Amino acid sequence: MGISGAKMVERQSGVALWRQIADRMRLAINNGDYDETGMMPPETVLAARFGVNRHTVRSAMAALAEEGIVRPIQGIGTRIERRDRLRFPISRRTRFAQGLGNQARDIEGRMLEAATEVAPGIVAEALGMPTGTLCVRMETVNSADKRPISRATHYFPAERFAEIGAIFERTRSVTAAFRELGVPDYVRRSTEISAIHAEGDDIRHLKLSPGAIILVATAINTDLEGRPIQFSRTRFAADRVKLTVEMDA
Amino acid sequence: MGISGAKMVERQSGVALWRQIADRMRLAINNGDYDETGMMPPETVLAARFGVNRHTVRSAMAALAEEGIVRPIQGIGTRIERRDRLRFPISRRTRFAQGLGNQARDIEGRMLEAATEVAPGIVAEALGMPTGTLCVRMETVNSADKRPISRATHYFPAERFAEIGAIFERTRSVTAAFRELGVPDYVRRSTEISAIHAEGDDIRHLKLSPGAIILVATAINTDLEGRPIQFSRTRFAADRVKLTVEMDA
DNA sequence: TCCAAATGTCTATTAATCTAGACAACCGAA
DNA sequence: TTCGGTTGTCTAGATTAATAGACATTTGGA
């Protein structure tokens, strides 16, 4: 159960039981409580759990079905059709944790790997470096409420940000790492968004089923002087995130 | 008619009409809509305005009277007893007592319980601890001028803050307790805000009527090194507090 | 093929909510 | 004192919400 233990529904509160139950089931679904099976527990189980009649649970379920969140299948059970996707705002000041902000309790960035290597052609061009220049490549996985949301590959000019891997490992934040390395603020110059089928390690890291769709956001960040400091390619699990592009003057 | 225009109440929404009306009247009161007279409009007027029977309005009024917000006087009308909503700022440096500052004379934090136990999954994740790690759970109620404002459940890593319960009991302040335990300053890493209907013990501790709305702020605080030191879930009585989120770089 | 498990549908009953109307009780002012 | 306006109380009925039980229907697997 939740943080504060087993919560019973409240009677005579002016809020119908089926509505309370529907609200709590929607929360549980979005929280990923039923991700293992992708199915709701049987109606009889839910009725017992909430201490109400099965018909009351069915009313709640009908409300969720109306919203398109679940779909009942006779003889099988009730399938979870849709989880609300996190809204990830992309703007001039895109920051991972800030962007998801209050859409999840626990936003975590985990580093998989960091290495210094020769910048690939596209990266060198994006960062305005001669071909053959060294860069730091950093691989991260970002999660919201324990659920992996995105997988990113970042490139930084090695000259300025040689230690960024170690600092990220400690601060778990690109923004914080930049700050420690003398970049108090930075802005996004460009973002390109595309969609492909998931493949390779992304399937494993994002816990996707083969053939799932991922959104790819390729971005360039610059410091306030306009010098490129980061090239990143972030793969979002498309069934968990929607990207909202925000324009600004 | 309030700021937000003429909204009709919704039928068959799973929320009783009297509850919807009570909520909207509470908002209007706290918004100062009736400050000129200090009285509610007559029940017949309200009934016409909301498009419901007078008895339905009376049910809503009874709920507000139960909360101590209004007091009906036969022959005269219904007087507004109390209308105040504290502003609670949420920022990188959120502190309970400081935040309420000069909005109340007497700001009190009372501890209900403190226990060392295995951290729930969400908490362990939030605090960056392996699952199964011990944490201190502390339950508090915060009041301003003797009126309960919020009810919070805090989690601290047991390793660093085993004694925080005893220290809070003495100092009545999380900030002070942290200071004694070697954390001179701390910042808020994240805050998630949602709203639900009050239920369970919160109704009793916050002296709410069943079905009242509470604001839930789930927060993680870190020390200046960025290590998570506190996970908390604070439930604010929504009719007594408004949260103002302050952005910073 | 048969069974267990799940959702779908139906009837019946009780409780809560909302409407409707009438009238009593109370207060302030004309 | 009378009267208009207000809240308080009562009865009655309609609608919605919730409980209870029975049985049909569908599916997947033994």
Image (spheres, coloured by chain):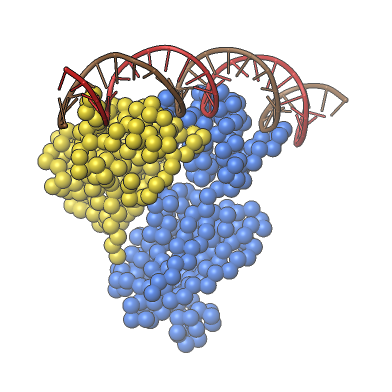
Chain colours: A blue, B yellow, C brown, D red
Q: Residue at x 60, y 36 (%)?
A: A62
Q: Can residue B183 be seen in this snapshot?
A: yes
- As drawn, the residue found furthest toward the left would be B105
Q: Quadrant of residue B167?
A: top left
Q: How many marks?
A: 0
For the residue pair B182 and A36, the one nearer the viewer reads as A36
Q: Residue at x 27, y 40 (%)?
A: B29
Q: Residue at x 21, y 28 (%)?
A: B76
Question: Does A35 sit above or below residue D3?
Answer: below
Question: Does A32 sit above or below residue A157?
Answer: above
Q: Is residue B94 left or right of residue A41?
A: left
For the residue pair A9 and C11, the one nearer the viewer reads as C11
The picture places residue B233, in percent across and down from the top left corner, at: 33, 41
Q: Residue at x 29, y 73 (%)?
A: A182
The picture places residue B140, in percent across and down from the top left corner, at: 25, 35
Q: Which quarter of the figure is the C terminus of chain A placed in?
A: bottom left
Q: Quadrant of residue B206?
A: top left
The picture places residue D24, in percent across and down from the top left corner, at: 77, 24
Q: Can residue A4 be seen in this snapshot?
A: no
Q: Quadrant of residue C13?
A: top right
Q: Is residue A180 left or right of residue A195?
A: left
The picture places residue B43, in percent across and down from the top left corner, at: 32, 31
